[in-house]
Amino acid sequence: MYDLLLTGGLVVDGTGVPGRLADVAVEGDRIVAVGRLRGQAARRTIDCEGLVVAPGVVDAHTHYDPQITWDPVCDTAALHGVTTVAAGNCGFSVAPCRSDDHDYLAQVFARVEGMDLDSLGHVGWEFETFEEFLATRPGKLGVNLGMYVGHSAVRRWVMGDAAYEREATPDEISTMAAMIDAAMHAGALGLSSSHAPTHLDMADRPVPSRLSSRDEMRALADAQGRHGRGSIAYAPESAVEGIDSADRDFLIELAQRGGVPVITQGLGGRSKVDAPTKTWQESRAFLDRSAALGAPVYSLLMTRPLNGPFDLIDGTTRYEGVPLWNELMALDVATKRTWLEDPTRRDALRRAIDEPNRDPARGSTLPPPFWESLRVSDVRSAENEPHLGRSMSALAADSGKHPADVFFDIALADDLATVFHWSNETPAWRELLKDVQKHPQMIVGVSDGGAHLDRDDGQEWSTHFLSTWWKQERVWRLEEAIRRITAVPAAILGLNDRGVAAAGWAADLFVFDPETVDVGTCREEADRVTGAARFRAVPQGIKATITNGTITVEDGEITGAAPGEVVRPR
């Protein structure tokens, strides 16, 4: 007798071949048969007629490692068909962390990844070392968890406060390399690190990994290379403005030293928060060169726009790359109003937004929202009602004003309570993305899940990818779209028993209605555990998410089961 039988669905197995009408049988945590199995006995049967049965989605870039200690299913990740998450990215992992260093870890996650500082008090501290963290997860996971070991966390463990101040000594590098070796033995996905100038802590210090030398990075890649499995996740310094030639060569070197794929971000764009633009052809040539050398580099590609609302009462972190605007956002409301009514201040603010910071030595280089994609979302005054839904650039063109003046005038008319909505989506972004996502070394989707509570963090990326790029834009056939979000990321991460729905493989499955699958609703809600405000996306058309043979989501409801495993590269 089977434990679970899915009957009559279109099985799109993740290999890229066309789907076929078939039944899928599960025993324990494995798929045991795919074929004509109707009439066979099973403890639970799900009628999948008219539905697609696909492998569970693999999210290659998240920051769920703090959240997963109190939220086993990573909530909306599982709702959208995700069965495996890769966490510990960008050099930030919840472990290793000494018992007296929890405040340090919390403030780094809060500043760099936009997490709620109070919510981080919910982390279940049953561990200090990376190995202990992995050992405490079985029985407490609703999704499968793959973990990178974060460079900043390792540096902090070895160097203490000096990690913020200087390069490491040879002895310190040797100790760090030994920690990477131990983490790989325990099952780490690999090393994650960052030199990105947007990564600062709450004291405006560069995070520890940014103080590392290239020789330190080489030593840690060599430590992983002695295992030759998993992947290295690394954001170089030039990732924010478009990866330069020196960093491209270094990415290939890291792949050669580690003997594994390197995953980066920011290829071809004006910034790592922008889609690839005019530099895409150059980036394509680099990716092809890395593959030809047998040292493939992959780039994360968010195929859904970044976006989120804000008002000038509470402010936003989106202007960290414009120091004067960032200062404005932190002021009390009365002082903000005074600044915006002062012509001299206005003039300085206009000049500042026209020349955002591009020097990492001066602080964050995060690009500000584009005027063409910053829109009026909600208003309080009658005079602002005609502006609803319109962009700052369009309103500026109509009025002959600088977009900053339009922005400030609208806010003042609502006593700073106007809700603006920023996004990185433009017509050019959408059009070029149709081509960029087809490159085999672009990892489509990815969420940044668990981070950035002030905006939609991309948690619905998988259903967005299917509803937008398969159903609406027809960039992909269904079988290839499924492969790109299942088997491909699993293979890059080195998870060789995930991402394919076939006999002998892990029973991670995603069942959805191809006619109605969609991102559904995404709105700000109070987190059910921490109470913190965050965006929560609830999809449409999802029948079930099944992890290791156990249903974790059924008809949009989380079941409370915790069948997830720590997944390790092979």
Image (spheres, rainbow, N blue to C red):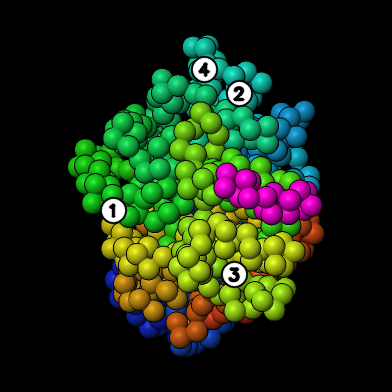
Q: Secondary structure at mark 3?
A: strand
User: Residue tagged by mark 3?
Assistant: 376
Q: Give the percent coordinates (x, y) of residue 371.
A: 49, 60
Query: Residue at horizontal 63%, vertical 50%?
Result: 343
Residue type (three-letter) at the residue carrying disc 2: Tyr
Tell which tag, 3 or 4, sits nearer the viewer: 3
CA–CA distance between discs 1 and 2?
36 Å
How far, Cα to Cα, is label 2 from label 4? 9 Å
Q: Is residue 363 magenta?
A: no
Q: Quadrant of the C terminus?
A: top left
Q: Nearer the viewer, residue 15 or 520?
A: 520
Is mark 3 in CB contact (under 8 Å) with mark 4?
no
Tag in front: 1 or 4: 1
Residue identified by numbered label 4:
167
- For disc 1, the marked residue is 278
- Cα distance between the residues tagged 1 and 3: 29 Å
Say which amino acid is labelled 3: Val
Residue at the front extreme, as displayed: 343
Q: Does residue 118 appear in the picture of this structure?
A: yes
Q: Which residue is mark 2?
A: 164
- Marks 3 and 2, the one that precedes in the sequence: 2
**Which range of residues does the magenta coloring cover?**
332-348
Disc nearer the start of the sequence (3/4): 4
* Residue at image coords 63%, 63%: 409
Is residue 260 found left or right of 396 in the rendered image? left
- Disc number lying in front (1 or 3): 3
Frontmost residue, 318 versus 547? 318
Q: Earlier in the sequence, mark 1 or mark 2?
A: 2
Name the residue rendered at 28%, 57% in the picture.
439
Instruction: Tell me which secondary structure the magenta stretch mostly adopts.
Output: helix
